[in-house]
Amino acid sequence: MSQHKIIYDTDPGVDDAMALVFQARHPAIELLGLTSVFGNATIQTTTRNARFLAGRFAPGVPVAQGAAAPLKRIAPDPLAWIHGDNGLGNIALDMSGAATLDERPAHRFIIDAVRAHPGEVTLVAVGPLTNLALALADDPQFATLVKQVVIMGGAFGTDGVLGNVTPAAEANILGDPDAADRVFGAQWPVAIVGLDVTQRTIMSHDYLASLRERGGAAGQFVWDVSRHYEAFHEESAQLKGIYVHDSSAVAYVLAPHLYSTRRGPVRVLTEGIAVGQTIQKPATMPVPAPAWDSRPACEVCVDVDVDGMLALYEKTILGTL
């Protein structure tokens, strides 16, 4: 029996695609479904990409289309200069084997799957958190049946890292800060894998080339899909490789011992020049903070065993676990 039943809430996205291959290749993960959301591209594009990825790497796994825009804001522009015009690094997409699109909206798919497997489902969310917020609004009690929620998003100031799209905000949280604040305050266990650890975790050019040479079709795909993405990183951050964002959330599910966390409630700023900023009140902080104190604690990742994470991804792609 698989150890982790996962619904993957995603806005594919190059790093989303790399994280999907990671999940599909790992024997301890059972993918129950992919739910699409706006973010790296429009909802039409991210849904198509999710169907392509599921059909190629996780045959039989359904895809449900999710939110096209934030709860209270206008959808952001697609990030073509980062993820390519098609969201997947401008690789050719053969849709002949694409996954079936479920008739339900993503938030309803999530609720139904969790209620079908109470206490067993992990939600891995690596885009704006709109679908999760909509599920909470539709069925507030279902949150108590979720095993855990693992989010790639946010930044908490470790080593001075506070944002990657503004000085104060990370892209997924800024995509829908209202939704993020609701998700972080709900009655389910939340772990946040943010820039504090994902920007420390770098897949070098040579690492990616090694996956291409030794990883068969999966390794070749990881190489192909990351070419445009690596060029962006070299231009924007002078990096000979790529930051490992979404796959880090998957690694946390599989191997939480690779991460050090800090416990405490988290709020998201929903207005002002720092909109999208994520702020934790550590559990060790004794002073009253009413805006935080009534909310459940989240686990925020503040350190990572980089070599261990990269080895886990490599062994998964190579099939040598």
Image (tube, grey):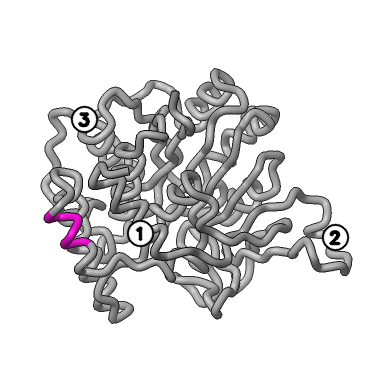
150 relative to 173, above or below: above
Q: Is residue 37 magenta?
A: no
Query: Residue at the location (70% across, 58% down)?
Result: 263
Q: Residue furthest top?
A: 116
Left or right, 145 with reference to 286: left
- The numbered mark, 3 or 2, whose residue comes first in the sequence reads 3
Image coordinates for residue 34, horizontal then vertical, percent: 38, 34
In the image, the segment drawn in magenta is 208-213
Image coordinates for residue 220, horizontal then vertical, percent: 14, 50
Give how far apart the Cα atoms at labels 3 and 2 are: 48 Å
Judged by its main secondary structure, the magenta piece is helix
Callouts 3 and 2 close, C-beta under 8 Å: no
Query: Residue at the location (56% across, 26% down)?
Result: 114
- From the image, state whether disc 3 or disc 1 is nearer to you: 1
Indicate the amino acid at tag 3: Ala
Q: Is residue 212 magenta?
A: yes
Left or right, 265 with reference to 71: right
Q: Would residue 261 be visible to someone looking at this image?
A: yes
Disc marking residue 98: 3
- Residue at disc 3, secondary structure: loop
Tag 2 residue: 290
- The numbered mark, 3 or 1, whose residue comes first in the sequence reads 3
Give how far apart the Cα atoms at labels 3 and 1 are: 29 Å
Tag 1 residue: 310
Query: Residue at the location (64% across, 28% down)?
Result: 145
Indicate the amino acid at tag 1: Leu
